[in-house]
């Protein structure tokens, strides 16, 4: 029998089956412990003698003492015993020890002064997937183009044979869709239905005779519209193309059950607005970092197959369709809700749906900051004849009746705001609801209210309901809080069933899912959309014919017997801009030169602080200002003294006789009330680019340089100008890049302007001030 000493020596000589983790040296425990924070340096007088300290330390330190290690560096007492005999274990024990060793070596530091302490669940999280995997992009277009099967290129002769209006410089294609197939396009295009029907932004587009194109604007700054094919049974054949089925190359496209549409290039120069406001530069093109999009062979048009970063589709909520069906017999519809609840989108979609049953729909805009058809600051009513397929800046329209308030919120003038709405509501009841040329037809009214739903905003909304007297109200809930959102009415129920009140039915609606929309428009705020809408208005070219162009052409003009005012007020025609002039900035466009004594009767200042402007400073106030052009039925505005004009001319002549050369001739009275909405109406906006004196020294006058997109016929009747709180955006003051005659470097330092992105908080270099110190630092 072997002795214990021999067995121990044999075990020590034998190599272990797996490497053991060496135990830490007790002397190294100081290095593993956290470093204590540095103490503040004391003065030299407070430093003790190092010799005495060394002596005292050596006397106190025991020779055989061992420092106590931390709990994660404690030494196994069993492994340190020399009397233990190590015997080889079987294979199962070795496997278990190997797993233990590998796991111990894979773990990081148990404690760090810059990392949080390890939790008990850390070991479980090491082997679990905490973050969800990437979601698959949502498919937008189920249509896959195949040339000469479901996609056909059209030349000029084929376009004419199909009954489509041909354009010399625009290409067109024929697209055949199956029932339920969807297609989404990025860019600008014209669409016409030849067989079947399509659903687009709430409107059902059917074939018509003669064929008519509908302009569609689909930028990345807004959700992309999606066309969905809806086939019609053979008993109700809506194919209007007589020669389409006879052409051999199109027989496969026009088979029964298919939906056939024609897509044509749309050239309106709306893309040039991106050069004017560079925040929207390239919004009609795919993102630079995205994959290439399928091409249909049309310039500036891209097929969107699935959602990508910055491109999202418009998905109509499922609870809107039942509401649209219920409101077909109601004529006055009011939409209200908090901001970012989908209120304006619902109102636009509702107009498109009503145009399927009515020839015209009236739209009353009460939201001063987010207008649909007119620039901001106006309470306006527009009579719409064609569906709206695009964001607000793509369809600036002349109002049929409007009032200019000059502000983006009614907070400063709530009484004037309500008076303007009451005047337009009276105009609708007397002049628009039952048209003179078609007395058997009624024009429905859609009222879009503001998103201010608390305090004074709730009171104004309630007063608007009393003025309008709607047949139905569509109320968007505010995150399920009911009356906590500021509404004075009863909280709507979760279902879409209307409940009757004292005067009208209330249709409750859930707020639209703004997650997708906010993701799609993350780079564009509400202020950015207001800027592009205002600049789009000043660069717009309004057609000289109210008839819908197909495609847009501006060759026709009015007859001498028909005036623009008659078309807007009496004939209730829609005059919408279809082209934009962006080759020159506002600072380089040729202006109108206006003699203020002959062309203007009154100048009003409205808004906060306007009552403090004295007469001598009115010229500086109007320089570079945006004004509303107002027409008064009696030539003067209520509240303006009728003798002002005669007294003003008398004082002016007396000053000239005395030799004065710096006479201010602008007809302005300090602290005068705004024009009365009952006796006036606004035609549009104008930009006063400059105020200058006449070179004739004998008759000193004031001349203005004015820019406005309004037709000249409307300018002659707008003799009252109103200056409000709205100002021209900074982008309207800048020159266009790469323009002939423009400065080479547009990004050089300019007063009050900063180019590039601002630095975040904490990114700047810290400045240490040595003159400010604590007592302990002295």
Image (spheres, rainbow, N blue to C red):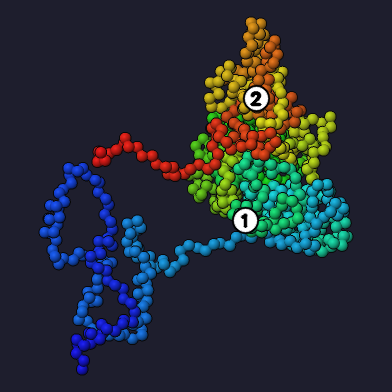
| Image position, residue 383 (x, y; %) | 72, 38
**In the displayed structure, would residue 624 be above or below residue 47?**
above
Residue located 77% across and 51% down the image: 264
| SS label for mark 2 | strand
Quarter of the rendering occupied by the N terminus? bottom left
Residue located 20% across and 64% down the image: 67
| Image position, residue 41 (x, y; %) | 24, 45
Q: Which residue is mark 1?
A: 290
**In the displayed structure, would residue 76 be above or below residue 519?**
below
Residues at marks 1 and 2, CA–CA distance in whole angstroms: 45 Å
Relative to residue 316, is residue 713 drawn left or right?
right
- Front residue of 680/98: it is 98
Task: Tell me the crowding category of disc 2: few under 14, some 14 to 19, or many 20 or more residues within 10 angstroms, Cα based.
Answer: some
| Image position, residue 412 (x, y; %) | 54, 30
Task: Tell me the crowding category of disc 1: few under 14, some 14 to 19, or many 20 or more residues within 10 angstroms, Cα based.
Answer: few
| SS label for mark 1 | loop
As drawn, the residue found furthest toward the bottom would be: 1
Relative to residue 601, is residue 2 drawn left or right?
left
**In the displayed structure, would residue 18 be above or below residue 673?**
below
Residue located 74% across and 40% down the image: 579
Tag 1–tag 2 contact (CB < 8 Å): no
Q: Quadrant of residue 33?
A: bottom left
Mark on residue 463?
A: none
From this viewpoint, is residue 197 visible?
Answer: no
As drawn, the residue found furthest toward the top would be: 658
| Image position, residue 472 (x, y; %) | 63, 44
Say whether disc 1 or disc 2 marks the residue closer to the N-terminus. 1
Q: Quadrant of residue 227?
A: bottom right
Residue located 71% across and 62% down the image: 144
- Front residue of 536/329: it is 536
From this viewpoint, is residue 406 visible?
Answer: yes
Q: Which residue is mark 2?
A: 690
């Amino acid at each position: 029998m072997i002795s214990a000493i021999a067995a121990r020596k044999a075990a020590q000589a034998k190599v272990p089956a797996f490497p053991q983790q060496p135990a830490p040296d007790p002397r190294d425990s100081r290095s593993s412990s956290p470093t204590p924070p540095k103490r503040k340096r004391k003065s030299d007088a407070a430093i003790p003698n190092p010799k005495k300290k060394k002596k005292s330390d050596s006397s106190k330190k025991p020779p055989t003492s061992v420092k106590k290690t931390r709990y994660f560096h404690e030494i196994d007492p069993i492994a340190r015993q020399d009397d233990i005999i190590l015997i080889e274990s079987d294979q199962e024990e070795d496997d278990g020890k190997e797993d233990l060793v590998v796991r111990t070596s894979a773990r990081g530091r148990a404690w760090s002064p810059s990392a949080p302490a390890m939790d008990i669940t850390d070991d479980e999280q090491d082997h679990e997937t905490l973050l969800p995997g990437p979601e698959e992009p949502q498919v937008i277009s189920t249509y896959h183009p195949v040339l000469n099967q479901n996609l056909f290129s059209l030349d000029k002769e084929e376009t004419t044979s199909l009954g489509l209006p041909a354009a010399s410089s625009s290409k067109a294609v024929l697209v055949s869709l199956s029932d339920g197939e969807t297609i989404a396009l990025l860019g600008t295009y014209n669409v016409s239905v030849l067989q079947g029907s399509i659903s687009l932004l709430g409107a059902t587009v059917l074939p018509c005779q003669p064929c008519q194109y509908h302009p569609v604007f689909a930028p990345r700054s807004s959700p992309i519209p999606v066309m969905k094919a809806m086939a019609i049974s053979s008993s109700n054949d809506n194919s209007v193309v007589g020669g389409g089925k006879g052409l051999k190359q199109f027989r496969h496209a026009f088979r029964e059950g298919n939906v056939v549409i024609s897509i044509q290039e749309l050239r309106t120069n709306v893309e040039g607005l991106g050069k004017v406001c560079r925040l929207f530069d390239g919004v009609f093109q795919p993102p630079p970092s995205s994959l290439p999009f399928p091409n249909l062979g049309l310039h500036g048009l891209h097929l969107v197959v699935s959602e990508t970063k910055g491109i999202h589709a418009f998905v109509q909520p499922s609870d809107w369709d039942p509401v649209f069906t219920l409101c077909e017999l109601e004529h006055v519809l009011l939409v209200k809700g908090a901001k970012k609840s989908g209120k304006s989108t619902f109102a636009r979609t509702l107009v498109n749906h009503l145009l399927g049953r009515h020839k015209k729909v009236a739209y009353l805009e009460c939201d001063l900051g987010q207008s649909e058809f007119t620039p901001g600051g106006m309470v306006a009513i527009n009579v719409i004849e064609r569906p709206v397929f695009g964001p607000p800046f793509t369809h600036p329209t002349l109002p049929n009746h409007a009032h200019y308030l000059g502000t983006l919120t009614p907070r400063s003038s709530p009484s004037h705001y309500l008076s303007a709405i009451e005047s337009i509501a009276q105009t609708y009841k007397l002049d628009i609801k039952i048209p003179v040329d078609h007395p058997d037809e009624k024009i429905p009214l859609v009222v879009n209210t503001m998103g201010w739903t608390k305090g004074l905003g709730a009171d104004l909304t309630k007063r608007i309901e009393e003025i309008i007297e709607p047949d139905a109200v569509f109320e968007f809930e505010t995150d399920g809080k009911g009356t906590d959102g500021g509404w004075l009415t009863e909280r709507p129920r979760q279902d879409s069933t209307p409940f009757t009140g004292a005067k009208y039915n209330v249709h409750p609606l859930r707020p639209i899912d703004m997650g997708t929309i906010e993701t799609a428009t993350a780079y564009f705020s509400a202020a950015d959309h207001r800027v592009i809408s205002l600049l789009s208005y000043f660069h717009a070219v309004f057609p000289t014919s109210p008839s819908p162009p197909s495609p847009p052409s501006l060759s026709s003009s009015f007859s001498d017997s028909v005036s623009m005012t008659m078309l807007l007020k009496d004939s209730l025609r829609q005059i919408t801009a279809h082209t934009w002039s962006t080759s020159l900035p506002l600072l380089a466009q040729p202006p109108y030169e206006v003699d203020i004594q002959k062309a203007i009767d009154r100048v009003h200042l409205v808004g906060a602080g306007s009552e403090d402007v004295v007469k001598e400073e009115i010229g500086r106030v109007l320089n570079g200002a945006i004004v509303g052009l107002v027409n008064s039925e009696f030539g003067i505005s209520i509240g303006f003294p009728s003798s002002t004009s005669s007294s003003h001319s008398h004082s002016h002549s007396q000053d000239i006789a005395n030799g004065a050369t710096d006479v201010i001739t602008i007809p302005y009275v300090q602290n005068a009330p705004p024009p009365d909405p009952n006796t006036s109406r606004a035609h549009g906006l104008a930009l006063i680019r400059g105020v200058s004196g006449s070179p004739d020294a004998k008759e000193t006058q004031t001349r203005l340089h004015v820019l406005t997109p309004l037709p000249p016929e409307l300018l002659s009747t707008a003799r009252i100008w109103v200056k409000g709180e709205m100002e021209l955006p900074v982008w309207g003051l800048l020159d266009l890049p790469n323009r002939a005659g423009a400065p080479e470097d547009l990004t050089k330092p300019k007063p009050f302007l900063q180019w590039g992105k601002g630095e975040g908080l904490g990114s700047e270099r810290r400045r240490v001030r040595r003159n400010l110190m604590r007592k302990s630092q002295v």
